[in-house]
Image: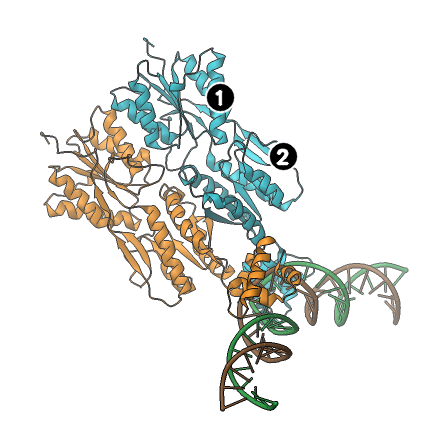
Chain colours: A orange, B cyan, C green, D brown
DNA sequence: CGCTTCTCCCAAAGCGCTTTGGATTTTTGC
DNA sequence: GCAAAAATCCAAAGCGCTTTGGGAGAAGCG
């Protein structure tokens, strides 16, 4: 059933039927009701491609995932971000189209996306400190919102980020207040902007209490469980091990905990752990009381909000760029305690 | 730059340019080269909607994610499945469009997808034992491939599944051979077909050695870490606790391990653990030697293969349905050992 | 009552591509 | 050298929708 058939069946022109369905005022209420009823009855839905071609709007948002960084990208938080964004898209009648591309083809992918016109805008994931995609998208005039931000890019663009620096700085100070002095940071890949900012927060937190940073207490890599395990293990086995760890994700924190417990130590009593908790749905940080003391911010909410921002931008072209900086909560769980006495 | 402009620039008709670009034989090699060069130079890409409208092919595959089951669905394996499928799509020039829908709207979503014609086929995720989506899609005549299968549906349809029953049966026997008799199963939601089959395998494995099942040793829920932790904890605290656990996912197994270690027990020495390992990229089961003894099958490979099957079906309409049943490997790690003596 | 203004509807022109059916030129066969 | 076949190219007709620019007929105005 297409528009022509529906209009013939109703004895009306395609114009009238189209207008009735799309809520234009040039059609009487009586015929509108008739049209709506007929459309409902025959389960009519306009062909997306045809409509899109006629209106110029794709009604779809693109998410580009580079494959080589797929450990980092198709990662633990990604699914939840998408779930949040997808909720918003669904409510507004937008589709979400994902492109998995090899890393070197990424720039070309954005160009192609813009040219093929099958998306109205894109979300930029996992920005690096000086991300070339931002300039590219501005050049292509394709609306976009960055999840995170790119510190070194000085042009005006829309982004939504968590105050990673402040969050980790607070976590660091929290540990210092508990008497810890040897505090380790198990960070994500530091070419990612968020990881860099977290390190800044860590360094700032230490500096505020005149504690020197120690390269042996800082690790940075993809945020997997084994990475947390191995890093913490090595540090714990060294002389003068850390008494506290800050992990960049709950997955990493699980590895840290494993290393601690393997050595017959007890979390909180012997070694404290704080992590950044993205509130991943299938990896909740405990039910009532959190397991890990954590800086917490929902990546799902971030997905929802980024999508809203992008849709607003698409529907009001020329509107100014919007930035949002969310503060993470610091929630206290069972993984932290005062530094052990002999520390 | 669109086709008309490109053809005017070249002094050729749109027909010729279109044919040159799409490799039709009715154009001389000389002009083809000229056209290709010009297209390259001006970065021409055909408008996806227009092409799609003209050809009748959307060049896109749909993945529908019900929101209410999103804990189950936008879950730990989903991201990797998508990554695998997306690879295949990318190579074949297909897009992946995801729809997040509220649970009750799911049926309507498939209808709408079919009517709006913005996908050429869909992947069905997480089938239940008697999944109504299969009949619906057959009725709609929309090509599809099921990841998993729906045991109670007797019609012929394409699916790719892991031999969940055999895998868990082997795991169970493996534990029995090590002397274990009190073996617990921490399963996924048993309205999911895979979970049901895993239970069958577990029961069959026990039955083969004439071990009676014990309801206290069987739990089933969403596969989160806290679920594993809580289930294992309760069982371990009961009189005559299990000496071995079979966990339906590595995430659950992490929770089981935590419960074990919290009680001062040691995995393998005191309590054995086997899990189903989907080889999730950011949650590798150890680097060299696996941490957990596991039945292993790559969900990413499954994504790749499902996508291939679906594309083949779309490109050869009327081809017979294809079924693939993959055997999981049983890899031995450090989480299993002989049953403790007093067992 | 004659004129203008609404109201409601429609024919037709795109949107940018593919593809059918033909036209024109070149090559081939005898 | 000329008809037939092959090789190239093109105009135009869709694909299914939205939207522009009118055109009847009804209602409002003096």
- The answer to whether dots 2 and 1 both sit on one chain is yes
Neighbours of disc 1 within 10 Å: few (<14), some (14-19), many (20+): many
Q: Which residue is mark 1?
A: B201
Chain bearing tag 1 is B
On screen, residue B285 versus residue B139, left or right, reads: left
Q: Quadrant of residue B212?
A: top left
Residue depicted at x 13% and y 37%? A180
Q: How many marks?
A: 2
Measuring from the top left, give residue B36's x and y in whole percent.
58, 61
Please identify the quadrant where the N terminus of chain A is shown.
bottom right
Of A316 and A192, which appears nearest the observer?
A: A316
Measuring from the top left, give residue C16's x and y in whole percent.
56, 65
Please identify the quadrant where the C terminus of chain A is shown.
top left
Is the residue B180 above or below the residue A98 in the image? above
What SS does tag 1 mark? helix
Chain bearing tag 2 is B
Neighbours of disc 2 within 10 Å: few (<14), some (14-19), many (20+): few
What SS does tag 2 mark? loop
Is the residue A271 above or below the residue B20 in the image? above
Of B81 and D16, which appears nearest the observer?
A: D16
On screen, residue A95 versus residue A275, left or right, reads: right
Q: Quadrant of residue B141?
A: top right
Q: Which residue is mark 2?
A: B156
């Amino acid at each position: 059933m297409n528009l022509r058939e529906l209009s013939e069946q109703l004895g009306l022109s395609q114009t009238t039927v189209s207008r009735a369905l799309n809520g234009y005022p040039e059609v009487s209420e009586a015929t509108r009701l008739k049209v709506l009823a007929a459309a409902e009855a025959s389960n009519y839905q306009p062909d997306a491609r045809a409509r899109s071609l006629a209106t110029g709007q794709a009604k779809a948002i693109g998410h580009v995932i580079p494959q080589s960084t797929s450990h980092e990208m198709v990662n633990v938080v990604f699914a939840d971000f998408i779930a949040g964004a997808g909720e918003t898209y669904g409510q507004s009648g937008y589709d979400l189209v994902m492109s998995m591309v090899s890393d070197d083809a990424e720039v070309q992918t954005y160009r192609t996306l813009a040219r093929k016109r099958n998306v109205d805008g894109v979300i930029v994931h996992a920005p690096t400190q000086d991300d070339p995609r931002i300039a590219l998208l501005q050049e292509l005039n394709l609306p976009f919102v960055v999840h995170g931000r790119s510190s070194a890019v000085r042009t005006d663009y829309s982004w939504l980020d968590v105050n990673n620096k402040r969050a980790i700085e607070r976590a660091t100070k929290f540990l210092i207040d508990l008497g810890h002095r040897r505090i380790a940071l198990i960070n994500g890949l530091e070419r990612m902007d968020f990881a860099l900012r977290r390190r800044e927060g860590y360094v700032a937190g230490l500096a505020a209490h005149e504690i020197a940073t120690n390269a042996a207490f800082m690790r940075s890599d993809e945020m997997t469980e084994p990475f947390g395990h191995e890093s913490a293990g090595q540090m714990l086995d060294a002389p003068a091990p850390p008494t506290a760890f800050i992990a960049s994700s709950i997955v990493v924190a699980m590895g840290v905990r494993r290393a601690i417990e393997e050595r017959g130590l007890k979390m909180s009593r012997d070694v404290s752990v704080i992590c950044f908790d993205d509130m991943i749905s299938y990896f909740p940080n405990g039910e009532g009381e959190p397991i890990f003391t954590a800086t917490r911010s929902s990546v799902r909410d971030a997905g929802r909000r980024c999508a809203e921002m992008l849709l607003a931008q698409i529907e009001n072209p020329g509107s100014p760029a919007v930035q949002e900086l969310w503060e993470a909560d610091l929630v206290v769980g069972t993984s932290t305690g005062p530094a052990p006495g002999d520390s």
